[in-house]
Amino acid sequence: MTPRNALVTAALMACGALSSARAQNLLPLDFSQNVQAVNAIYPNNSTLGPEYYNGLSFDFRNVTTQGGQAVDARVSVIGTEGNYNFVGWIPDYNSDAGQPDGDLGVYYRHNGWFPPVDPQNPDAERFSTGGMAFTISFFVGDGTFTTSTVLSEVGFLIYDFDGEPGQSELIRTYLSDGFAGYQIRNGSGIDTHFQGDSQLFEAPGTNLSETGPEGSFIAYYQNTSQIRFDLFSTTSTNNPPGNNGIFASFDGDLGIVGGNLSGYGAFVAIPEPGTPLLAGTALAGLLLRRSRTRS
């Protein structure tokens, strides 16, 4: 083995050890003990759930324990943008034969409106861009949801993140929330873009499993009391009618893979070592220009 190859091998082994150690230190999160009862069924006429809650805020008791103290959580929609509507939350998503997985499903949809037809090019494909943002806030577990608490290390395996040929899916995470790094599922086709103060994850635009890890990535956080996720999409007039729903599930204990991370790439720390902030800013500008061109 050449010295260079030896260094590469050592680096890969170190990354693998780092990701395994990080996963072992995570506080497991369980979104199965919801306070508000589900109040609707079959979100967006899909079979997902099928029961869900359509309120903008949704409370959960005993999502984890830290230092012997129970922790509660509240998920809240903080806004929508463009021609997209929030549909609802699916608590305890993907439970298997009565065994709670405790995953949190999040569902939104395009409302069917597109920019007017261009009289000069009436057959041109048109695009609509927007989405929703929500937060997960952690509280001392006394049932009052009033005293914020900081969690040392948590992670979310976000799956069914795939998109369709006529409807993209993207998720943004924020460094200010304690976002520390990520791992991408091998073969998922998920792309990433560092943007200075945030990380953008872009789905491949192909339909993958709604209950398996094939289209997934893991987002890791340290010393956090509130986490924000931006979910957004670009929908085309070529998107088949009825396919306007966008769904992702948030697995807070990595239970869908049983804690086995062999199917994921190496842990990538954020900010990435040696990545100039200027490069991230330039990329953000390119993405914004692309969005304006498509919408």
Image (cartoon, rainbow, N blue to C red):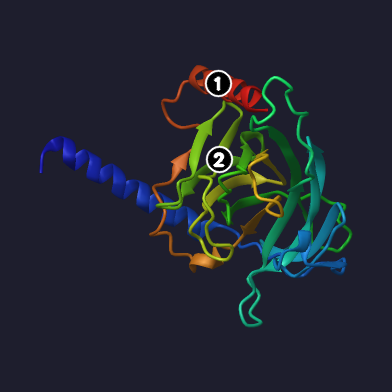
User: Which of the image's four quarters has the C terminus?
Assistant: top right
Report the residue marked by disc 2: 201
Q: Is residue 282 left or right of residue 5?
A: right
- Where is residue 156 shown, x and y percent of the image? 59, 54
User: Which of the image's four quarters has the N terminus?
Assistant: top left
Q: Which mark is residue 234?
A: none
Residue drawn at point x = 64 percent, y = 57 percent: 250
Residue drawn at point x = 70 percent, y = 28 percent: 122
Q: Nearer the viewer, residue 177 or 283?
A: 283
Helix, strand or loop at label 2? It is strand
The part of the image, by quadrant, that contains residue 50 is bottom right
Helix, strand or loop at label 1? It is helix
Crowd tier of the residue under label 2, counting other residues whose Cα lies within 10 Å: few below 14, some 14–19, many 20 or above: many
Say which label, 1 or 2, has the lower sequence index. 2
Residue drawn at point x = 85 percent, y = 58 percent: 54
- Where is residue 240 shown, x and y percent of the image? 65, 50
Does 291 appear above or below 205? above
Q: Nearer the viewer, residue 218 or 26?
A: 218
What amino acid is found at the position of numbered circle 2 in the picture? Phe
Does 249 appear above or below 236? below
The part of the image, by quadrant, that contains residue 125 is top right
- Where is residue 8 shown, x and y percent of the image? 24, 40
Tag nearer the camera, 1 or 2: 1
Residue 244 in view of the camera: yes
Q: Which mark is residue 286?
A: 1
Residue 270 in view of the camera: no
What amino acid is found at the position of numbered circle 1 in the picture? Leu
Crowd tier of the residue under label 1, counting other residues whose Cα lies within 10 Å: few below 14, some 14–19, many 20 or above: few
Q: Nearer the viewer, residue 271 or 190?
A: 190
Report, in whole angstroms, how far the alpha carbon at label 1 lies from the one at label 2: 15 Å
- Where is residue 121 shown, x and y percent of the image? 67, 23
Residue drawn at point x = 85 percent, y = 66 percent: 40
